[in-house]
Image (cartoon, rainbow, N blue to C red):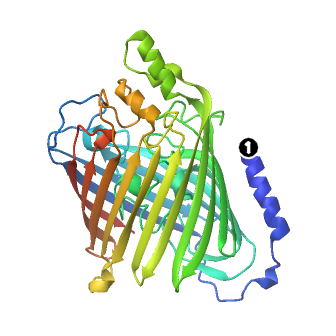
Amino acid sequence: MRITFIAGTIALLAAFTAPTAGRAQEVEAPPTQTWAVHGQTTFVAQANAAFRAPYGGANSLNPSATGRETWDVTFYAGLRPWSGAEIWVNPEIDQGFGLSNTLGVAGFPSGEAYKVGKASPYVRLQRLFIRQTIGLGGKVEAVEPDLNQLGGAQTSDRLVLTAGKVSVGDVFDTNRYAHDPRRDFLNWAVIDAGTFDYAADAWGYTYGVTSELYRGPWAVRLGVFNLSNVPNSTKLGTNFSQFQLVGEIERRYALAGHAGKLKLTGIVSRGRMGRFDDAVALATLTSTPADIAAVRRYQGRPGVSFNLEQEIAPKVGLFLRAGWADGRFESYEFTDVDRTVSGGISVSGSRWGRDGDTFALAAGVNGASRERERFLNAGGLGILIGDGKLPRPGSEALVEGYYDLQLTTPAHLSFDLQLVDNPGYNRDRGPVAIGAMRLHAQF
């Protein structure tokens, strides 16, 4: 019912505000694709240097020099069954592990590392969705063929409805300079707002429906998605009894002739989740480590984030994100962050004669609520972190830089370096240096 209400409300609004067809500018549209097949593969080898760590816990980053790798292959098959519609399916082959089995750092250093790792390749269906675009007038724009996007044309004013198995990040909190771990930054708290606790299984996908309304320089997006059956699970719920609502407002503009976007994104998750202070009180009573699963009940956790992308010169852009989430409750799906800020710069290699290359640099700070700090100090384990105790908490700070080298038109080789201070909000551990090599190709 929630899905029908959201889609129906925006469709009704679009019907009342739609301009007549004659108002659309008559320009020659590019050929419309009726089907397409694409593919990509990404290999990441990543290692951390040895670092200071007087103690550790079940979810700690290994303080010894350690290296791991991940590899994936994704296929994208798309079909246009009728005008404005697209159906896409994305089977994927995955293999490998993140550092310390994707544990130990709230802003984890590889967006290509899932919470589930396997030594042997395995196949999953990551996306299966239908998208319907309804033109509402305005300028006719070219749509270039891409992954999960058929080539053709669309009007600047439009309504876009999507339903099926997707990643929430396909639609929300996108940023041209920092959002794709296969092509730009790797750190989780740089490619997304660390507080954006978006609905997802352990691989980052879920079932849901979204509505996007574009009018002039504005866009409004709404979505409802299934949460996992329990926080940080490999299994999704089946009936939306535990769900997440996501809303976003976007304003596009030009500053001194340079394009920019500003987004405000809000979420509310409703499901069985634990309150940190309840877990600490139970631990004190029973003289056992804090267990968030023992105090879960149906309640909600809100969050909000800000997202800016701004070109400042030809082929040079800045980005900035900041976010807050209710730190009284456990994070449900993404990572253990209650407040965050990150930003950086991306420079195209065209400025030194290498059109396909990119150099970029980012920095960020993640914070934990006092309630989360007390929980971790009582021996509690979060989604990614938990050193057994936390007597000296501090903000987790990071710096990341990468150079992406175009080998051929479809193939790129990247070198990435990160420095993380106070991993897992622990002043007694770190700082840790992390290096990575990434090989990516797509067609």
How far across and down, in percent of the image, does residue 265 sit? 58, 55
The residue positioned 65% from the left and 37% from the top of the image is 240
Tag count in the figure? 1
In the rendered image of this protein, does residue 27 appear above or below residue 379? below
How far across and down, in percent of the image, does residue 54 sit? 17, 32
Q: Is residue 145 visible?
A: yes
Q: Residues within 10 Å of mark 1 (few under 14, many from 20)?
A: some
Name the foreground residue: 273 vs 24.
273
The residue positioned 53% from the left and 35% from the top of the image is 228
- Occupied quadrant, residue 351: bottom left
Mark 1 is on which residue type?
Arg
Residue placed under numbered mark 1 in the picture: 2
In the rendered image of this protein, does residue 262 appear above or below residue 294? below
* Quarter of the image where the N terminus is located: top right
Name the foreground residue: 95 vs 435.
435
The residue positioned 62% from the left and 80% from the top of the image is 141
Q: Is residue 102 visible?
A: no
Name the foreground residue: 193 vs 36.
193
How far across and down, in percent of the image, does residue 71 sit? 30, 51
Q: Residue furthest right?
A: 16
